[in-house]
Amino acid sequence: MILRINHFVILFLLIGFKTVKAQKSQVLERLDLNNPQLLETKEAYQKGNEKAALESLLTYYRKKDDMYLKAFKSDIDFIKTQYREAVDRTVKTANEVLKKSFMFRYEWDMEKTNIPYQFKGEINWTASPNGDPEWCYMINRHRFWIDLGKTYFLTGKEKYAKGLVNQIAHWIDNNPIEDRLKKLSWRRIEAGIRCENWIKSFEYIKESKYVTPEFLVKFLNAMYEHGMYINSSYNYFSKTSNWGVLEFHGLFNLSHYFTEFKLAPQWQHDAIDHLANNIQLQILEDGSQWEQSPMYHNELFHCFMNVNLIAQRKNIVLPEILVQKTKAMAYANIKWQKPNFHQPMLGDSDDTDLRGLLTQASFIFNDEVIKSRALKTLDYETFFTLGRENYRTYQNMTSSQPDFLSAYQKSSGDYYMRSSWKEDATYTSLHLKKLGNGHGHDNILHFTLFANQRDYLVDGGRYTYVNNEWRRLFKSSKSHNTLGVDDLPNSIYKNSWTNEYEARSQGIYTKSTSDFDYAEAENTAYKRLKDPVSMKRRMLFLKPNIWLVFDSFSANGSHKYSQYFNFPNNLIEIKNNGLSTTYPKDNLRIQPINETRIELVDAWWSPEYNLKKKSKRAELSKRAKGFSSFISLLYFPETTVLRFEKTPVYNREDELISDTDAEAVSIFYEDKQYTLFIVHNSPSPKTHFFKVNNQLIYGEVVLIEKGINGNKILVIKE
């Protein structure tokens, strides 16, 4: 029995020895040893001295310029003083990771978690302990390894380098490229994402005694396999979705850090070629990514910024489209950025601050406008990428406000209205067109409202990607500030990523001036009904803080028509035939002008993935046959003292016009009277002129401004 065990042990050791030896030879064969900088490695290898060759190779990588890390040991005291809280978080995360405890809380983590999970034994890299496969994907992106590396850099304690080396080795040993893992640890986007994270982590620890020649062999072979795997396919899905950018950004990182691989030049060519193709196909003329999710727009923005940064450092001439459209992505962020500097929660997006990304962008493009919407000084993460010298350079950069306020992103169909670029500005977004599918929500005609440094009307958020009732709820039209018919959804949900029926819009029209913004569109969702319903929203934003919203429905039969308003909390009440928030001050009033039924129901708001908070939703509804409309006035009565009235409309023969055909509302504010006139349905092709407030006018949408110097008539839409 003892003899058999010994034979088995000897056989196992022999197999292991041969495997390690094969890996050493394999990595040396994969390298271009004609590289003059590898001369010592080449000579040792040709003499059959693999040990000396690999020791020489490790020395070469330790001396090699870092691609990302531009902070030095001499900066450590400055970092600990300037970024004390961030350093504490880094060390805390590193200690948790050493204990094999994971919680995904980085600012731009695509699928955050709020509950830590600790492995009692070995890490299972294919686990999904919360039942959501996104957990498995997150752990296999290895962002947390950068914190292990950073903590080693900041403290000099070898246990962090040792822990990182052990976890990388464990992952490599337990995750061969096999079909069973290609939907788990070897999904293509995880392979792409972790290329950046592995390189950054390695740069922090490469001087450690635990980074041995044997580890380097394992690490280089694994990186080579990543490159081969990523570059093995470039299909239509990769070309047109965020996946392709994440994949080939990974290959770009590999090809420009591991330039010693024989295949590196081919990888460099293919990565740039594919990324140029991706940005051309996916980034629209208005600078937004077509999937209509700022979250994923910014994941790709991060990738393209890295490409530009590395190209600048290595004097790589990029295709012009990769430079110009990356900058356009920065400006898309500026256009939709809220006064608190966060991105809108459009589609599958979280409530995330944009300033860190824009800080890096303003430096890369040396752009004063981008800097005006970024941080005043380098953030923690960007400091490590740019270093102390560029910290001072950034400090000295001037900034200038954008030369625009409101912006309509015509390609994607999103209208962003604002009163100023100050933090106390009033801001409204209006979603007029749907392009995105999987990451897009059922949100045509949805609008949000931010003012007085708080959210008043919000997007419900995303919460989960698991195909269940929560996913259905958060994607639904009721979780957005939009319109409905007969309690039916706008689009018909099929699963997490697709719908059986897609709502679409038509008739988009916008107009912007220094005094007001206006937009309208029709949602065709309910034309699918046996008795088709036309549904249209018109919104006027009178700057700085008054909104008039005309919502109209038209059908032959009788239907229930609804407006939905979603709030981020429970601070809302039905009061005086309208809705009022109940904050200590600066409350929003939503005042229906036409008669309507008002109901408050329990709802949910999800400011980030895996987090939901109790909130309220208001539904304003009525049952009507044929045509019907809602007119809603939104304002802040504590600071905006006004009165309003429904204003009769006449034709030029002084005959009263039915509300079915045209409506008008007058607002009396300060020393002016504003009357918004809307034609729903012209009574006759010949009826072009109307009389409102004894003023003869023409046009489909008209704003009459009456002041002490007389009337000013603005034809918004003829």
Image: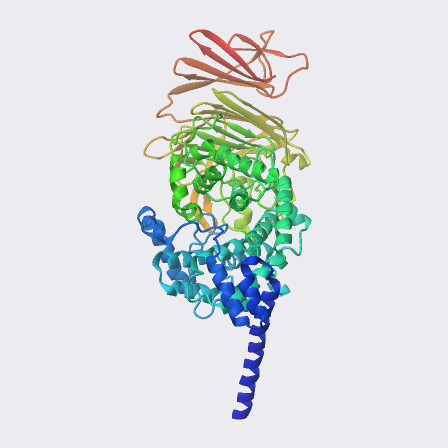
- Residue 504 rendering spot, x and y as whole percentages: 64, 36
Q: Is residue 176 left or right of residue 400?
A: right
What residue is drawn where x is 66% and y is 28%? 556
- Residue 218 rendering spot, x and y as whole percentages: 53, 66
- Does any portion of residue 165 appear in the rendered image? yes
Q: Is residue 700 left or right of residue 418?
A: right
Q: Is residue 134 left or right of residue 241?
A: left
- Residue 558 rendering spot, x and y as whole percentages: 62, 31
Name the foreground residue: 86 vs 225: 225
What residue is drawn where x is 44% and y is 66%? 119
- The image quadrant where one finds the C terminus is top right
- Residue 590 rendering spot, x and y as whole percentages: 44, 29
| Residue 103 against residue 355 in the figure, above or below | below
| Residue 183 against residue 574 in the figure, above or below | below
Name the foreground residue: 694 vs 523: 523
| Residue 107 against residue 28 in the figure, above or below | above
Residue 222 lies in quadrant: bottom right
Give the number of marks. 0
What residue is drawn where x is 38% and y is 40%? 392
| Residue 11 against residue 474 in the figure, above or below | below
- Does any portion of residue 124 appear in the rendered image? no
**How are the residues colored?**
rainbow
Q: Is residue 210 left or right of residue 500?
A: left
Residue 164 lies in quadrant: bottom left
Name the foreground residue: 155 vs 678: 155
